[in-house]
Image (cartoon, helix red, strand yellow):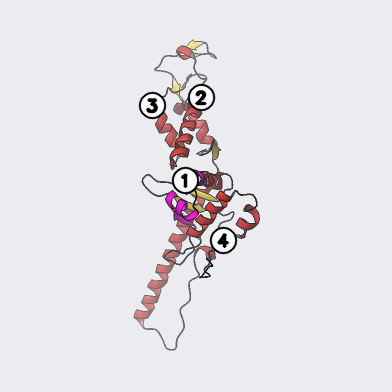
Amino acid sequence: MPITTPNYTQTPNEIFDKYMPIMKGSELKVILFIIRKTLGFVDINKHRKITDKISISQIVKGTGMQTAAITKALNNLESKYKLISSRKEPGRTTVYSLLFEKTLSESEIVEEAKPFRKVKGSFSESEKVGAKTLSESENTKESNIKKKYKKRVISSSLQNNKKTYLEFVKLSDDEYGKLNSKYDKSDVDSYIETLNNYMGSKGKQYKSHYYTILNWMRKENIPKLKYCPTCKNKLGYNNKCTNCGINISNEKVLYGEDI
């Protein structure tokens, strides 16, 4: 069936010139769907959207793909290509944002305020007050939009600094180091695998993978690593410090969060 209405969605040229030759078909379909849902629409202030709440069921309907393929494509778009970021809150639809290499200029975020049209004659005092109030309102609206956009840029930057473990789990070097300072590495890696498998099979999203793993390990009462209060070495069997050559009482041992 031929296209009947020549409507358009702004799509970055890089999608066609840089990414289409190297992307899988599933990845290309998903990113184009996200672009359609964001740049293809304007918000109430008539600004192009770069963020939108998008459910897996919407992507299934819009692309004709299976959930497993969509989940894998979303992960690659976020961790491999760095084209999107995602934010999931409990009980709410995942929010997806397009990522750009540079911060958008003010003209790309907020439309320039149109000057008042000059007419013959002088304005009354009430008209002047009304114009001033409208101008202040527009400035406040622009300021709020810029603040919200800055928060999204900062949030996206933090996500980009995280490494992907296995397929879906994202942790920064600092977060991974903290987990390994609190618990044995084999336990940490085991819970990373558990979280990865759960996300892959259920399509579940978490705001912080670090705190999710930490809470799971606390609830399961996984034994914490113990450290010598003198030399800060890990303690072995019976709380013995191999460096100092003495056994440390439970009252004096240090844990990962104490160091």
Q: Secondary structure at mark 2?
A: helix
Q: Residue 78 location, x and y as percent?
A: 54, 47
- Going from the N terminus, do you reach mark 4 or mark 1 first? 4
- Going from the N terminus, do you reach mark 3 or mark 1 first? 1
Does the magenta portion include 21?
Answer: no
Marks 4 and 1, Cα distance to the nearest angstrom? 25 Å
Q: Secondary structure at mark 3?
A: loop
Q: Circles 4 and 1: CB distance less than 8 Å?
A: no
Are there few (<14), some (14-19), or many (20+) residues within 10 Å of tag 1?
Answer: some
| Looking at the image, residue 82 lies above or below residue 105 | above
Residue located beneath label 1 in the image? 67
Residue located beneath label 3 in the image? 220
Which residue is more in the foreground, 169 or 128?
Answer: 169
Residue located beneath label 2 in the image? 186
- Going from the N terminus, do you reach mark 3 or mark 2 first? 2
Tell me where the magenta segment starts and ends, as one range: 44-70
Marks 2 and 1, Cα distance to the nearest angstrom? 31 Å
Q: Residue 92 location, x and y as percent?
A: 38, 48
Residue located beneath label 4 in the image? 11
Which residue is more in the foreground, 35 or 59?
Answer: 59
Q: Secondary structure at mark 4?
A: loop
| Looking at the image, residue 144 lies above or below residue 93 | below
Does the magenta portion include 59?
Answer: yes
Which of labels 4 and 1 is toward the front? 1
Q: Amino acid at mark 3?
A: Glu
Are there few (<14), some (14-19), or many (20+) residues within 10 Å of tag 2?
Answer: few
Q: Amino acid at mark 2?
A: Ser
